[in-house]
Image (cartoon, rainbow, N blue to C red):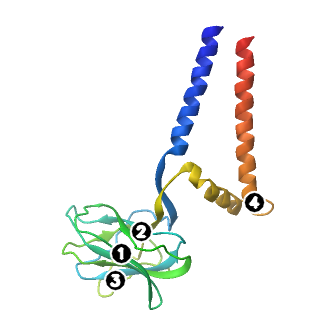
């Protein structure tokens, strides 16, 4: 049975390594999104801007937009976040993006805002058109005075936190959202209990398998 034990041990080792690679992989950390489907566009001709009112998540220092440019290099664009007449954050993306996600650093971390105006100004010569989702006329949508849009569209906004984080770093946020999705007696602690239970079951499975192989 020795070859079988070696095979089981090797398989367990590979699973642990694969799990470690996934959990330790780092990427940009999402602070929030309006989660709109990338479909219709909001046309922003040269020298104009489109503004959209909506919530802004706490802790973001950059905004990502999926921008159509008719397959031509475009930009620069400016992004301004305002609450009333007060500018809370602003940033720019340089010329050169072409039908792609464009990430604009905002220079500071955003506060948690239930409602703010996010304005995209096109300082280039090529028309830019952030993608979003068609919404009812009565809903919050992008507005560009003087430019008639085909349909009312809410632009897709993805807000990111500074730096990068691993899935392990995401764990506290996942625990908090787990509690929000399951109100009542559930709290963030229940997420950790569920994780501990799964780990215990996995460890028990490995133990039983090892005992079975030895017999």
Question: Could you give the CA–CA distance between mark 2 and mark 1, rounded to whole angstroms?
Answer: 9 Å
- Residue 207 vertical placement versus 66 (above, below): above
Label 2 crowding class (10 Å Cα cut-off): few <14, some 14-19, many 20+? many
**Mark 2 lies on residue:** 63
SS for callout 3: loop
- Residue 177 vertical placement versus 16 (above, below): below
Label 3 crowding class (10 Å Cα cut-off): few <14, some 14-19, many 20+? some
- In this picture, residue 101 sits left or right of residue 165: left
SS for callout 4: loop
Label 4 crowding class (10 Å Cα cut-off): few <14, some 14-19, many 20+? some
Q: Quadrant of residue 206?
A: top right
Cβ atoms at labels 1 and 4 below 8 Å apart: no
Q: Quadrant of residue 134?
A: bottom left
Residue name at image x 64 percent, y 57 percent? 172
Does residue 156 appear anywhere in the picture?
no
**Mark 1 lies on residue:** 91
Q: Give coordinates of residue 54: x percent, y percent.
A: 50, 78
Question: Could you give the CA–CA distance between mark 3 and mark 1, rounded to whole angstroms?
Answer: 19 Å
Cβ atoms at labels 2 and 1 below 8 Å apart: yes
């Amino acid at each position: 049975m020795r070859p079988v034990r070696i095979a089981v041990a090797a398989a367990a080792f590979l699973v642990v390594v694969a799990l470690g690679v996934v959990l330790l992989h780092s990427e940009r950390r999402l602070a929030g999104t309006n989660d709109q489907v990338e479909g219709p566009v909001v046309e922003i001709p040269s020298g104009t801007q489109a503004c959209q009112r909506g919530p802004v998540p706490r802790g973001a220092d950059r905004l990502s937009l999926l921008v159509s440019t008719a397959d031509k290099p475009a930009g620069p664009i400016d992004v301004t976040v305002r609450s009333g007449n007060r500018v809370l954050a602003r940033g720019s993306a340089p010329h050169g993006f072409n039908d792609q996600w464009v990430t604009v650093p905002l220079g500071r971390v955003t506060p948690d805002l239930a409602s703010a105006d996010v304005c995209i100004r096109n300082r280039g010569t090529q028309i830019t058109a952030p993608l979003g989702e068609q919404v009812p006329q009565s809903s919050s949508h992008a507005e560009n005075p003087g430019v008639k849009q085909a349909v009312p569209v809410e632009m897709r906004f993805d807000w990111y936190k500074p730096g990068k984080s691993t899935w392990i770093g995401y764990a506290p946020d996942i625990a908090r959202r787990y509690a929000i999705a399951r109100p009542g007696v559930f709290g963030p602690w229940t997420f950790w209990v569920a994780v501990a239970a799964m780990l215990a079951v996995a460890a028990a499975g490995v133990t039983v398998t090892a005992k079975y192989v030895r017999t």
